[in-house]
Amino acid sequence: MEIWPGDPYPLGATFDGSGTNFALFSEVAERVELCLIDGEGEELTEERIELTEEDAFVWHCYLPSVQPGQRYGYRVHGPWDPARGLRCNPNKLLLDPYAKATSGEIDWDQSLFGYDFGDPDSRNDDDSGPHMTYGVVINPFFDWEGDRSPRVPYNETVIYEAHVKGLTQLHPDLPESLRGTYAGIAHPAITGHLTKLGVTAIELMPVHQFVQDNTLVEKGLRNYWGYNTLAFLAPHADYAAASRDEQTLGQQVQEFKSMVRTLHAAGIEVILDVVYNHTAEATTSARR
């Protein structure tokens, strides 16, 4: 594979219409490997590319051949000294904290943890790759059709707080395929209801990619509220109608943008509920 130096900015995976620039910040890393993921299950493969370019603690490269839909992660080599907060372990595939979309769910396998269950002071070297959530390279280009935020004056603003699924899952006028999705919120049945109420802004409860808590999974339940964010820059994939029909990876981003564009056209601003101390990064993120 052809590998170019690339740029340290912007962070994350950035497709420019030809290829993709990858940039990851790590102040403690001694080596960083970009891992390109293909296949599923036992057919899953991982191509590792060592990042040899580093500027101001940002490790980077540009891959002319990588297109939207490519899944990826990182492996960071460096010191292991938990007493100093250093836990580099290249056996653990890390999710890019700047990922714009994700694929798959973590399954709470022992390998996802840096220690052995029951012994928090130990070091676990099992490979977490097959059990991780992966970042996805997205196509950032989108036709906003001249979209502008309504910018309603604060003294005239009426905010409606809503949950993507809760607002749409049981609405009788929504096609079943759109219930519980971003596309469902963009449906005339929902936008018409909101405008009839006089709503000028909808505040969406967490729409960032979040994990399904292990305690819930064991009981056959799901995380409804979403306050367990895994990737703050990636729309939650389960809320995308496209994901229910073997979507093109990253399509949830296009659907989310379409929802925002439609709401703006109806005179409704979009506010996101973001809580930065409610995260799942302790076990799965590349933040260091």
Image (cartoon, rainbow, N blue to C red):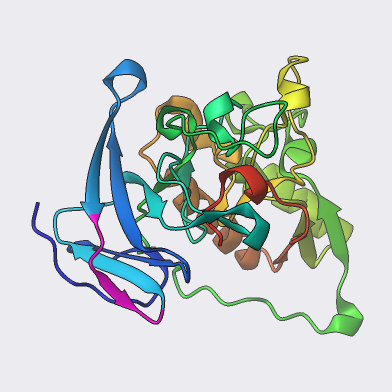
| Residue 119 on image: x %, y % | 70, 31
Res. 213 visible in picture:
yes
Judging depth in this view, the residue of 58 and 239 nearest the camera is 58
Q: Is residue 9 magenta?
A: no
Write the start and end of the magenta stretch as one range.
Answer: 50-56
Looking at the rendering, which quadrant does residue 115 occupy?
A: top right
Residue found 33% across the figure and 60% down from its top: 31
Residue found 26% across the figure and 62% down from its top: 51
Q: Quadrant of the C terminus?
A: bottom right
Above-or-below relation of 26 to 207: below
The residue furthest left is: 2
Judging depth in this view, the residue of 94 and 251 nearest the camera is 94
Looking at the rendering, which quadrant does residue 283 occupy?
A: top right
Residue found 27% across the figure and 20% down from its top: 43
Judging depth in this view, the residue of 25 and 6 nearest the camera is 25
Res. 187 visible in picture:
no
| Residue 14 on image: x %, y % | 34, 65
Q: How many marks?
A: 0
| Residue 187 on image: x %, y % | 63, 45
Above-or-below relation of 52 to 110: below
- Horizontally, is 148 left or right of 150 in the view? left
Residue found 57% across the figure and 39% down from its top: 114
Judging depth in this view, the residue of 75 and 197 nearest the camera is 75
| Residue 86 on image: x %, y % | 57, 58
